[in-house]
Every structure is written in C-alpha cells, then in structure tokens.
Amino acid sequence: MPVGVIEALDHEARGIARQEGKAIFVEGALPGELVEYASYRCKPRYEQAHLVRVIRKVASRVEPPCPHFGVCGGCSMQHLEFGAQVAAKQRVLEDSLWHIGRVRPEQIMPPIQGPAWGYRHKARLGVRHLPQKGGVLVGFHERKSSYIADIRTCPILHPAVSALLLPLRELIAGLSISERLPQVEVAVGEQCVALVLRVLEPPSPADEARLRQFADARQVVLYLQPRGPDTAFRFHPLPGPELDYRLPEFDLQMVFRPVDFTQVNHGINRVLIRRAMELLEPQPDEFVVDLFCGLGNFTLPMARRGARVLGVEGSAALVRRGEESARLNGLADRVRFAVANLFECTPASLAALGPMEKLLIDPPREGALEVVKSLPDAGGPRRIVYVSCNPATLARDAAILVSQKGYRFQSAGAVNMFPHTAHVESIAVFERF
C-alpha cells in the first residue's frame, strides 16, 4: 500500500499528502505523520483515502475519549490535541482568506475558545427503528452514511442531553408510532431541557400517556412537530419554564423556541458577543444595523451599550422573538426589527435602512454577497464587524469589501464554536477612513 507524509489538514480535517503532484486526502491522518493509506476514490487531480496505519506519529495525536469516535459522524478531530485543533482552524481561516479572496488581515486576533466537552446546547438527533434488532437508535449519523450511529453516550452534548440518549431509545421503541418518528431535536435553556419529537402521524392516547410519564420522570419539556418547524407545539407540561439563555455581562435574557436558530455553544457565544462589542464599539445614540440578526443575539447587546439598533432578519418568527426579548429587557425604545430577504439585497434597499454609522453582519454559510455588493463605494458604515460560519464565503466577501468598497481589512480570528469538529467560525473587522 502507498505511504505518504501528511502536510496539512483540509477544511474537513482530513490529512493532505501529495504524490506526484496529486493531492491525497487521508481521513484520520495528522500533519507531520508518515502514514500508510488505501485510496477509495481516485480522480485525475486528487484521491480520497482511508488511513491504514500510522508509521510515525506526531505528539499532538491523542486517544479519542469517546468510544464512538470514528463511527459517529458528529466529530472529526477528537484524535487531535485540543490546542492543536484550534491552531488548525486558525490556519484554515488564514489559508481561505488568501487562497480564495487574496486578502490578509493586518492583525490576527487570538482565537476564541472555551470548554472542550459538554458544550452542545442544541442538536438534531436522528431516529432509526430496527425491528430486526428489537430496538431503536437515537443519535447522530454515522460518518459518511445515512445510518444512525449506535451511540450510548456523547461527551460533546450537554450532560443532561447525553444522559437521555438511552432513555429516549426505550421511550420511542414503546410507542405505536415508533416507525413514524424520524427525528428528535433537543434544546437546553437556563431553566429547562426541551425535546421536539418529529411525528409523521399523531400519537395514540396510550402514546400520549407514555410521553407525559417520560417528561415528568425526566423533567423535560416535550414538543410535538407534525410538519415543518413552525408546527412544533408544546405538548407536556403545558405550564412551566420556557427556554431562554442569559448574557450576564449585558444583563440580558434571550427567549427562544426549541426550533429557533440559536448558537449551540452558549459559553463561546458569550465570549463572541463580548469580542464583537469590543470591536464594533457601539456608542450611545449611534445608529447601528445588525444584518442577519436572528433573534437579536448581537442586536440587544448593542442596544444595551446605548446605540440605536435596527435588526434585519429573513425569518418573521425570529423577528417576533427578538421583539419579545427587547420588551422583556426594557430595550423596545432603542431597538427596531425588520423582516427582509437579505440574499436579494440591493443598493436601494440597503440605503433605505438609513445612514448607518456601523454595521454588524452575521450571515449563514452562504455569506453576505449581495449585502457587501450593495454597500456604497464611498461613505456608508465606517466600521463593519463580520461574524462568519464559513471561511470560504467570508474570504469572497472580504475581497469585495477591500478591492471594490475601499475598506481596510483590520483584523480576523477563529472562533472554536464546535470543538472536535472541522467547523470553523470566525470574526473579522473592516474599517473605512
């Protein structure tokens, strides 16, 4: 079998070797290692390969603590020492900025990082009914497979959720609709744990009794979702605590529903917001715009700093949640929300928002292409803080801001929102003088 030296990690945490000019992507290999591999997909310019044997290990290789690592697709980097994971993500960010956007920030900020385990407050778990094995599987998909991994514990999930994996199997297996329940979405708030059961047909009265008993015994709130996310409704218990997360530094309580988009890592989210406020420096009575604002994760902290803030988001449901949190926190007089499809942004629609002094952008993986293209070539916000969950689209948008819109690329840094995965989040700052 072929042997190669691993030079780097790619954006999926695969080791990269090179043989006669061709890139070999080796799953499970780490930079600096000499490995034996077996290719399973061969193309003219690259190959994809399985790791067969590590001939020479590096010191950063560690024993994965999760017994399911390698089968479960939830993690891809547990075999790499935690600090080395963060450094690898920073390199992915810098490489993307240069190779895709041909831009480099003037300053590399220290990466934002936090606890390595038990950080996931939200997750979507698949369910698979296995009558031939007499049971049900609940968990993440297997790596590169549509099958559900047979996981019994998960160290990256919040401990309260990890402890529910096996009880959920037993619960669902005993329901008459077990074959019509393909998914469980989990959300952990400050006051409760919520489970959303995706039900393709209504549960029977006996099922309902079993669900109520489970919720009471496990002290969770159950929701049922018959169709799309907007159809999710609270099933049991009807009265009781609601989902929320707190931002103590800003004296904020953010309310949300279990199907709403929120950051999965509450600890890192707090640090990210602090960093964003330090970089944006919203001042009393400045007019600041928050695009792709969601339920106001950055909007309300900016208002708490005294700015007048407009949050714009494509989801009307999230805007309603933001307005609710603004009222709850006494900020309704400093915050406005609007619903708009920012992927169809134009110079006219952006100008209609008003003469913004500063701008925060926090788009999904697709980035904010139409937004940055719509910014004026002169004037406009003098400072932009861009929070990204995709280095490639950040690089593309940064190139436009620098080469076409006259911004200086002041700084950028990685955000380790998803430890032990290859997912790279980041934050960047652009200024115009």
Image (cartoon, rainbow, N blue to C red):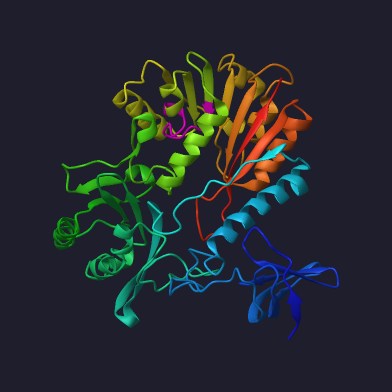
Task: Name the spot of residue 326 as percent of width and height, x first.
Answer: 35, 25
Q: Was residue 49 drawn as part of the magenta stretch in this picture?
A: no
Q: Quadrant of residue 336?
A: top left
Q: Is residue 61 above or below residue 408?
A: below
Q: Is residue 296 above or below residue 222?
A: above
Q: Is residue 396 in view?
A: yes
Q: Was residue 298 drawn as part of the magenta stretch in this picture?
A: yes
Q: Which residues are magenta?
A: 290-300
User: In this view, which residue lies farthest toward the bottom?
Assistant: 1
User: In this view, which residue lies farthest toward the right?
Assistant: 20
Residue nearer the viewer, 23 or 8: 8
How many dots with numbers? 0
Task: Name the spot of residue 59 as percent of width and height, x first.
Answer: 61, 71
What quarter of the picture does the N terminus occupy? bottom right
Q: Which residue shows up at 54% across the image and 71% down it? A: 62
Task: Name the spot of residue 224 as percent of width and height, x first.
Answer: 27, 51
Horizontally, residue 5 falls left or right of residue 273, namely: right
Main secondary structure of the magenta stretch:
loop
Task: Name the spot of residue 27 as percent of width and height, x first.
Answer: 63, 71
What quarter of the picture does the C terminus occupy? top right
Q: Which residue shows up at 31% across the image and 51% down it? A: 226
Q: Quadrant of residue 249?
A: top left
Residue nearer the viewer, 388 or 146: 388
Q: Which residue shows up at 66% across the image and 49% down it? A: 93
Q: Which residue shows up at 19% across the image and 54% down it? A: 219
Horizontally, residue 119 falls left or right of residue 70, namely: left
Q: Is residue 345 in view?
A: no
